[in-house]
Image (spheres, rainbow, N blue to C red):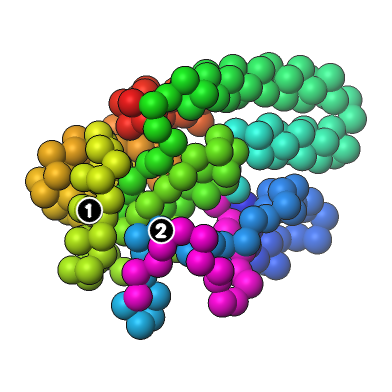
Amino acid sequence: MGGTLEPWSSKVVQNLPKEVKTLRLIDSIELLEEVKIDGTIDSHNHVHSENEEIDEREYDEHIWTSLENATKMIDFIESGLSNIDKENESFYKENAENYKKEINSVKDEIQEIVDNSKRKRLVFGDKMPMLYFIEEFGLEVSAAFNGCAEETVPTSSQIAYLVDLIKEENIPVVLYIELSNGKVAKTLSEETGAKMIKIQTLHNISKEDFENGETYVSLMKRNAEVLKQALN
């Protein structure tokens, strides 16, 4: 991907032989500015509510959580490979088109779920590194932490805010992300009766899923099933 999420990658590229070509996928996507997510806090322990403006311009680099972005990255990779290896251009193009069809099929499935859902809000009792996904499907979101937060323990005011929100809007599901201990989500679940369910941010993958050969497409299909419960 490149960017600040992978600070090691620039060092790797710098140490490659000059004839080695590289593709930095973050260059293929127009980045979204970070926003203050409802329920998170700032350095003064102020709990943010929706529509607050962010003080400094920073950009979210979790670009892969948007399925449309995923297809753009496929085109970017296909073009790069075809330019390097002209003889196999048709092979790359065919694979790219087939993969994009799979991704767009899942995107349509998720859009249909969202369009026919009772509610549009997701609540994360965890970090929320899915801004591009949220924007793509027109969802609303509340969370304990933003996508790049270093915090792991919420304040009592955050817990109270999210508990009240879940109760007021009858939110049925509290989400937590892969490789998380789920402690915050468990607390919110116990306080409200909302069900705890894991959502895949595709930032990491469990050892079990890796060994089972799970893919971007299969994990996004899993997210579609999560949304059926979380939005109804």
Picture mark count: 2
Q: Find residue 54 and name its label.
A: none
- Residue 210 seen anywhere in this rendered image of the structure: no
Q: Cβ–Cβ below 8 Å for labels 2 and 1?
A: no
Of circles 2 and 1, the one toward us is 1
Kindly identify the amino acid type of the residue bearing the numbered disc 1. Answer: Asp
Q: Is residue 192 left or right of residue 114?
A: left
Q: Secondary structure at mark 2?
A: loop
Splitting the image into 4 quarters, where does residue 219 fall?
Answer: top left
Residue 53 located within the stretch drawn in magenta: yes
The residue at the point 55 percent across, 35 percent down is: 137
Specify the segment rendered in magenta: 46-62
Viewer-closest of 217 and 122: 122
Viewer-closest of 152 and 116: 116
Splitting the image into 4 quarters, where does residue 170 fall?
Answer: top left
Examine the rendered structure and indicate whether residue 54 appears above or below residue 205. Answer: below
Residue ID for mark 1 = 164
Residue ID for mark 2 = 38
